[in-house]
């Protein structure tokens, strides 16, 4: 047994299965929120999530948060929200951060270090006064990538286009397969009043869209939006007595093999193959047990890669798996039921929104897009350029 496998099945981690539950969740300002700052969107969603749980901000004694533009982000968040946390986690590993925060928060809760953890994020990436070029320059300065930055690639787009090209070369994946992902996401978005893009979208629309980095067109790329999101995590024994139906964390794992895509051992295999395996092991479940799947779809190729790496189909079969609307409303596997980063919301980092959608589905709060009769959900976050991967397995009381 590998070291990773041994850790994932350790008694300590298995004992944490279902030990904590998400009891409040909220979003705010998704799409366009002119006049707001990152902090204000975070605060609005944080207050809403705490209220959703039936708690007060004074009940929060744990905090997890991260920002692309601030290395010391937890401190101004503590100050702005008026918190005095006994547990703080500012780990920043890109868009997977907020799913990666789950397991350390569960450990803090189980140890008694804290009693209620707030996980929160906010970004005005769409309406902020700084330009995208400013953000790109800041990222190059704060996060230099020695084998790639000197060539000034159009990151992160160039990296994902490279992965898509390799998948096409190795497995015969086509642009039409990628288009199926975009169209499925739009189909779900049309059922979601919170989604930013709800106009009809066809396969031909995607195939004819403006090419931005071959083989990815503008419709293969995620949105650039504003948005805030937050959720509250408490111990399972307390969750039973709060306002909302608890959503239990059954498994969580994070894996990363590289920062630069040029350092990936294989452009078609991501660290999700490890994080997924370990999260399933902790939960005692597998891909076939998942009722709904929320994946970080920054680009259409992500969905194919993660469906493969997380065990929903074999490596190289992602394209065939999504054909014919298989992951769209009415298909055999509900994927990205809010519309995902492609059509719902993507304010710089999307992971927290994937998790919130999974929570809402398990609580039965999704209205027209609700998937009936489900007790389990998978939420998966991706950070950097296929760099960090974090998988969460969630369930209702029936799944404990």
Image: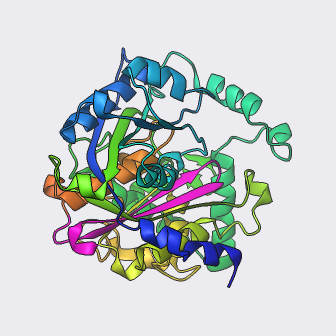
Quadrant position of the C terminus in the picture: bottom left
347 in the magenta segment? no
Q: Give the percent coordinates (x, y) of residue 160.
A: 63, 54
Name the foreground residue: 122 vs 344: 122
Colouring convention used in this rendered image of the protein: rainbow
> Is 178 situated above or below 331?
above
Task: Describe residue 97's horizontal placement relative to residue 166 as left or right.
Answer: left
- Residue at image coords 83%, 41%: 151
Give how far across and how far down residue 95 sits, in percent: 53, 46
- Residue closer to the observer: 224 or 380: 380
Kindly tell me whether residue 310 is visible in this rendering: no
Q: Does 268 sit above or below residue 288?
A: above
Asked which quadrant contains residue 144, the reply is top right
Can residue 12 be seen in this snapshot? yes
The residue depicted at 42 percent of the width and 62 percent of the height is 181
Identify the magenta region: 371-400
Residue 382 part of the magenta-drawn span: yes
Out of 237 and 77, give the one closest to the viewer. 237
Q: In the rendering, at what x and y percent does residue 136 appear? A: 66, 30
**Considering the image in quadrants, where does the N terminus appear?**
bottom right
Q: Quadrant of residue 113?
A: top left
Q: Is residue 356 above or below residue 90?
A: below
Residue 139 on image: x %, y %? 69, 32
Residue depicted at x 79% and y 58%? 263
Tell me what residue is drawn at x 33 percent, y 71 percent.
325
């Amino acid at each position: 047994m590998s070291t990773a496998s041994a850790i994932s099945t350790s008694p300590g981690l298995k004992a944490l299965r279902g030990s904590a539950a998400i009891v409040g969740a909220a979003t705010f300002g998704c799409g366009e929120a002119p006049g707001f700052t990152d902090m204000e969107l975070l605060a609005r969603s944080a207050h809403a999530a705490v209220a959703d749980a039936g708690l007060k901000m004074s009940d929060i004694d744990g905090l997890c948060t991260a920002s692309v533009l601030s290395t010391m982000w937890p401190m101004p968040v503590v100050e702005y929200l008026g918190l005095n946390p006994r547990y703080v986690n500012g780990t920043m590993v890109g868009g997977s951060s907020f799913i990666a925060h789950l397991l350390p928060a569960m450990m803090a809760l189980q140890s008694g270090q804290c009693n209620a953890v707030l996980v929160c994020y906010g970004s005005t990436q769409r309406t902020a006064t700084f330009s995208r070029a400013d953000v790109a320059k800041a990222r190059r300065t704060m996060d230099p990538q020695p084998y790639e930055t000197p060539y000034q690639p159009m990151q992160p787009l160039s990296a994902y286009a490279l992965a898509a090209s390799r998948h096409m070369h190795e497995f015969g994946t086509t642009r039409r397969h990628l288009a199926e992902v975009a169209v499925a996401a739009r189909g779900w978005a049309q059922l979601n009043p919170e989604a930013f893009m709800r106009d009809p979208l066809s396969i031909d629309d995607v195939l004819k869209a403006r090419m931005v980095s071959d083989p990815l067109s503008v419709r293969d790329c995620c949105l650039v939006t504003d948005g805030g999101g937050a959720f509250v995590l408490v111990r399972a024994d307390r969750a039973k007595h709060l306002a909302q139906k608890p959503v239990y964390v059954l498994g969580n794992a994070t894996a990363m093999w590289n920062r630069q895509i040029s350092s990936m051992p294989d452009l078609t295999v991501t660290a999700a193959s490890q994080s997924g395996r370990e999260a399933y092991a902790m939960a005692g479940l597998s891909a076939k047990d998942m009722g709904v799947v929320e994946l970080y779809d920054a680009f259409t190729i992500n969905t194919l890669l993660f469906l493969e790496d997380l065990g929903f189909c074999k490596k190289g079969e992602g394209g065939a798996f999504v054909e014919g609307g298989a992951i769209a409303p009415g298909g055999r596997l509900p994927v990205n039921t809010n519309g995902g980063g492609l059509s719902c919301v993507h304010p710089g980092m999307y992971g927290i929104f994937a998790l919130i959608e999974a929570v809402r589905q398990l609580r039965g709060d999704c209205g027209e897009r609700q998937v009936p009769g489900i007790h389990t959900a998978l939420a998966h976050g991706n950070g950097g350029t296929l760099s960090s991967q974090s998988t969460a397995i969630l369930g209702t009381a029936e799944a404990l």
